[in-house]
Image (cartoon, rainbow, N blue to C red):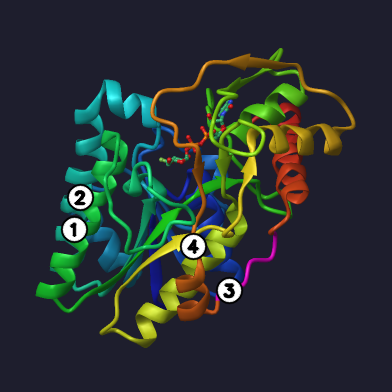
Amino acid sequence: MQKSILVTGGAGYIGSHAVLALKDNGWNPVVIDNLVTGFRGAVPQDVPFVEGNIADHDLVSATIKKYNIIAAMHFAGSVVVPESVSDPLKYYYNNTANTRSLLESIIKNEVRHFIFSSTAATYGIPETTPVHEDMPKIPINPYGTSKLMTEYMLADVAAAHDFNYCALRYFNVAGADPKGRTGQSTAGATHLIKVAVEAALGKRDSISIFGTDYDTEDGTGVRDYIHVSDLAAAHVIALEKLIDSPEDSHILNCGYGHGFSVTQVLDAVDRVTNNKLVRNLEPRRAGDPDALISDNSKIKQRFGWTPQYDDLNLIVKHALAWEQRLIENPIA
Ligand code: UFG
């Protein structure tokens, strides 16, 4: 029977790109998603789809057996930082408790490899940037803490069982599949590039710049924006490394190692659209660090990961193309 890879949250933004990357590289993904924030239409028709909860032991066990699952990529979870502050228990439930349940099904069914969507939010406000994996992890919101707790669980599970894992700490994920097959479809998104392309296409009147007095060159916040397809490619490499070296686990930053300010991002959107966004200068958003840039030397050395889309204009172009396609043909 052919081997398959379980993709939790495969109907979501990053998960749907991982599904494509797996298929493009000859793997067989199987998606489990509860469709609370994901879209059935984001999963290709020929990919097995299971609608349900990752904490449902019977469903997950049956899926593992039915499709001969040998590894899991775990994207399912809640991702809105301010919401994690107002409703922390939702985050400890969806991100931490449900992952614990999923891991129990994984271990009981002898699935040996696990790739986890972690986040730069585990670092909190780093003292220096670029931030290296070994620097202190002091999350400043429940979202970051809920993900860090999962990293701790994974380390303990790997020590106790025949199991290895890779936690990828994402920096600012943006853009869409270069072939236009999937993209970020989330309603009410808050992420800068998504919001900016919505404004560029008239879905919003203007864009807010949150804070102009940061300790950065132009005073606006600096982030390390990574194209979602480069991130998806890193997951496929992680899968292959975990299988090839079952004794080794990895915790790796996933970013380009350089950043852009909010102003630079909006300038790129203006360049790509040949138009001018209406910009509102507003106070800082709570909990935003001045700059957050990855030190990506570890993932490059260990995995030989070589980004293909390290180009802000291209990231914006792909995000814009997907936004346009959503207007013409809304996803369901
Ligand atoms: N920003 C604006 N206007 C907007 C949206 C964002 O000025 O309308 C600014 C923010 O203040 C920040 C930058 O654009 O300086 C990026 O903000 P995002 O909301 O796009 O992303 P964050 O850096 O806040 O969040 C990202 C990830 C989170 C992760 C966090 C870690 O999306 O998952 O980094 O700090 F938790």
Q: Going by the image, does 24 lie left or right of 71?
A: right
Graded by Cα atoms within 10 Å as few (under 14), some (14 to 19) or many (20 or more), the crowding at tag 2 reads some
Separation of residues labelled 2 and 1 (CA atoms): 5 Å
Q: Residue at x 17, y 44 (%)?
A: 97
Q: Quadrant of residue 53?
A: top left
Residue 148 percent location from the top left of the image: 25, 50
Hey, what amino acid is under mark 2? Met
Q: Which residue is mark 3?
A: 25
Residue at 47 percent of width and 66 percent of height: 235
Q: Nearer the viewer, mark 1 or mark 3?
A: 1
* Magenta part, dominant SS: loop
Tag 2–tag 3 contact (CB < 8 Å)? no
In whole angstroms, how far apart are the C-alphas of marks 1 and 3? 30 Å
Residue that mark 4 sits on? 295
Front position in the image: 181 or 59: 181
Which numbered mark, 4 or 1, is in the foreground of this view?
A: 4
Q: Tell me the amino acid under the disc marked 3.
A: Asn
Magenta-colored stretch includes residue 308: yes
Q: Nearer the viewer, mark 2 or mark 3?
A: 2
Asked if the residues shown at circle 2 and circle 1 are in contact, with their CB atoms under 8 angstroms apart, the answer is: yes
> Which residue is at the front of the view, 56 or 225?
225
In terms of sequence position, does the residue under pointer 2 or pointer 3 come before the other? 3
- Which residue in the structure is indicated by mark 1? 152
Q: Amino acid at mark 4?
A: Asp
Residue 77 percent coordinates (x, y): 34, 42
Name the front one of labels 2 and 4: 4
| Mark 4 or 3: the one toward you | 4
Residue 262 placement (x, y as % from top left)? 64, 33
CA–CA distance in space, label 2 to label 3: 31 Å
